[in-house]
Image (tube, grey):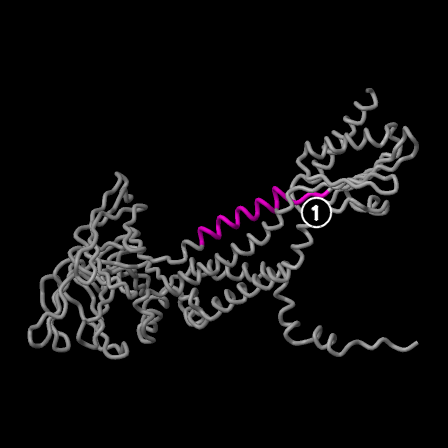
């Protein structure tokens, strides 16, 4: 016998590189793995501190943040975390790659399963063979029903309509066939879930690349700070108020602020925890507070380079001493100043209560000098005069713009509706056939094929039980 020769075109199609590459993306299991990876990245982003936006604009700023903030907390792990982008995980190559793969996976799964949808939406054909009724999990046979076909037929119609089944009836060769189905359109629940996942990811990407989130926006009283992120907005903190319980724990803290656009006030209000301020889709949320240092810096010709408060939101850990730390870029110069307060976890041998430490950095964050400033005194450093005026407080805000939030809400709705349709309203199909044995005896075969969902076995039992009661009632009559 000659060997079967395959069509070269067909073989080439099945074995093509494109088909092999796409095949894994048709798997729901693969999508689940990708979602787990994304969840792991999100957990890393929640646990590890993410580099503030002001330090990501230049490699030098990012390097300074790694060396002076991250390294104090994570030691030799800092280089490894930095290499994998864990300090800016939501913009890392790994995270974006997984997101793109998940979008492609959802699209391929949806398209590959769409061809089956047409068949599932068709009405159930009642004509089935006897072998069909003897297969599957939910089936039963009643070979000796002492009733004519017409009475059994009436009982079947009554029970299936009672359970809201769409009824189809045919008669062939003396046999009466029934089929019933309900929740036919619940198959769209799967596609609603697929679409919701796609919208979840799309909304996340919109927020990541067109929105922003600044979780460490700090501003001292009576100062103005630009919001940044191309918003052309600034925030002015008029006053900050904190209240405490008798045991010293914070009771309430709030910031009285004004939003400025191109220097003009456009909105004002008081921001409290869980009571944010909104303007043009941007959310200002009270998050934290801490110490600040009021300073004045003058240039060689006496011009004021900076006068205001420097917030100290970070901690510098050296020899177990935890010192509040903040930074200041001196406008119009190449200098960056790091300011340190005395330690909060014990008596500080290096910085006194009325002193602050100052580190001066030059071009490309090259260290220049270290100095201590005493409260109320002016000290000259690199032809500039620094004055430590007093200690103060700062208000810490979370500022965010989330253009993908509409997609997230729609996705959440579709996800809940889709899951509800799939699990609580699965399509159910039932077939029944009445075979005549004699003028007074009949044989009844029943089979149900439920989609995956809740209550399949219970519904099959209810239908057969109610049908049995109806048939017994007809016998007595």
- The structure residue drawn at horizontal position 27% and vertical position 76%, both measured from the top left corner, is 365
- Can you tell which quarter of the image residue 80 is in? bottom left
| Horizontal arrangement in the rendering, residue 243 relative to residue 414 (left or right) | left
In the rendered view, tell whether residue 18 sits above or below residue 286: below
- The structure residue drawn at horizontal position 66% and vertical position 36%, both measured from the top left corner, is 164
- The structure residue drawn at horizontal position 80% and vertical position 24%, both measured from the top left corner, is 474
Residue 227 falls within the magenta-colored stretch: no
- Can you tell which quarter of the image residue 304 is in? bottom left
| Image location (x, y in percent) of residue 19 | 66, 72
Question: How many other residues sit within 10 Å of disc 1, few (<14), some (14-19) or many (≥20)?
Answer: some
Tell me the quadrant of the picture where the C terminus can be found. Answer: top right
Q: Which one is in front, 118 or 352?
A: 118
Q: Which one is in front, 211 or 429?
A: 429
| Image location (x, y in percent) of residue 337 | 22, 70
| Horizontal arrangement in the rendering, residue 456 relative to residue 336 (left or right) | right
| Image location (x, y in percent) of residue 181 | 69, 42
First to last magenta residue range: 408-429
Q: Which residue is mark 1?
A: 123
| Horizontal arrangement in the rendering, residue 263 relative to residue 174 (left or right) | left
């Amino acid at each position: 016998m000659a060997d079967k020769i395959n069509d070269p075109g067909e073989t080439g199609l099945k074995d093509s590189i494109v088909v092999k590459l796409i095949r894994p993306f048709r798997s729901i299991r693969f999508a689940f793995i990708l979602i787990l990876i994304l969840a792991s990245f999100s957990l890393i982003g929640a646990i590890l501190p993410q580099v503030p936006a002001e330090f990501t604009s230049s490699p030098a700023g990012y390097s300074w943040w790694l060396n002076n903030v991250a390294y104090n907390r994570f030691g030799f792990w800092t280089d490894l975390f930095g290499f994998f982008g864990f300090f800016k995980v939501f913009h890392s190559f790994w995270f974006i790659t997984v997101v793109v793969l998940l979008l492609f996976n959802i699209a391929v799964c949806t398209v590959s399963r769409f061809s089956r949808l047409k068949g599932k939406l068709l009405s159930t054909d009642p004509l089935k063979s006897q072998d069909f009724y003897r297969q599957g999990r939910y089936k039963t046979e009643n070979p000796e029903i002492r009733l004519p076909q017409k009475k059994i037929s009436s009982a079947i119609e009554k029970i299936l309509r009672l359970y809201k089944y769409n009824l189809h009836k045919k008669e062939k060769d003396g046999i009466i066939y029934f089929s019933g189905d309900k929740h036919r359109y619940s198959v769209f629940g799967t596609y609603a879930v697929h679409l919701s996942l796609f919208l979840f990811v799309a909304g996340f990407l919109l927020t990541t690349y067109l929105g922003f989130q600044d979780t460490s926006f700090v501003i001292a009283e009576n100062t103005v700070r630009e919001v940044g992120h191309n918003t052309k907005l600034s925030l002015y903190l008029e006053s900050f108020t904190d209240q405490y319980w008798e045991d010293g724990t914070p009771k309430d803290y709030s910031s009285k602020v004004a939003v400025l656009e191109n220097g003009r006030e456009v909105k004002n209000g008081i921001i409290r925890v869980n009571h944010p301020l909104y303007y043009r889709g941007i959310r200002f949320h009270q998050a934290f507070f801490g110490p600040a240092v009021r300073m004045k810096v003058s240039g060689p010709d006496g011009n004021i380079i900076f006068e205001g408060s420097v917030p100290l939101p970070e901690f510098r850990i050296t020899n177990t001493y935890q010192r509040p730390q903040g930074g200041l870029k001196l406008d119009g110069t190449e200098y960056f100043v790091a300011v340190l307060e005395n330690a909060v976890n014990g008596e500080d041998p290096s910085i006194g209560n009325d002193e602050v430490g100052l580190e001066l950095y030059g071009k490309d964050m090259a260290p220049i000098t270290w100095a201590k400033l005493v409260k109320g005194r002016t000290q000259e450093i690199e032809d500039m005069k620094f004055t430590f005026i007093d200690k103060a407080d700062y208000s810490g805000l979370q500022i965010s713009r989330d253009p993908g939030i509409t997609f997230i809400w729609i996705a959440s709705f579709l996800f809940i509706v889709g899951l509800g349709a799939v699990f609580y309203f699965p399509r159910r199909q039932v077939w029944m056939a009445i075979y005549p044995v004699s003028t007074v005896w009949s044989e009844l075969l029943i089979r149900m094929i439920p989609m995956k969902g809740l209550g399949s076995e219970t519904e099959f039992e209810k239908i057969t039980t109610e049908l049995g009661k109806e048939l017994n009632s007809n016998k007595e009559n």
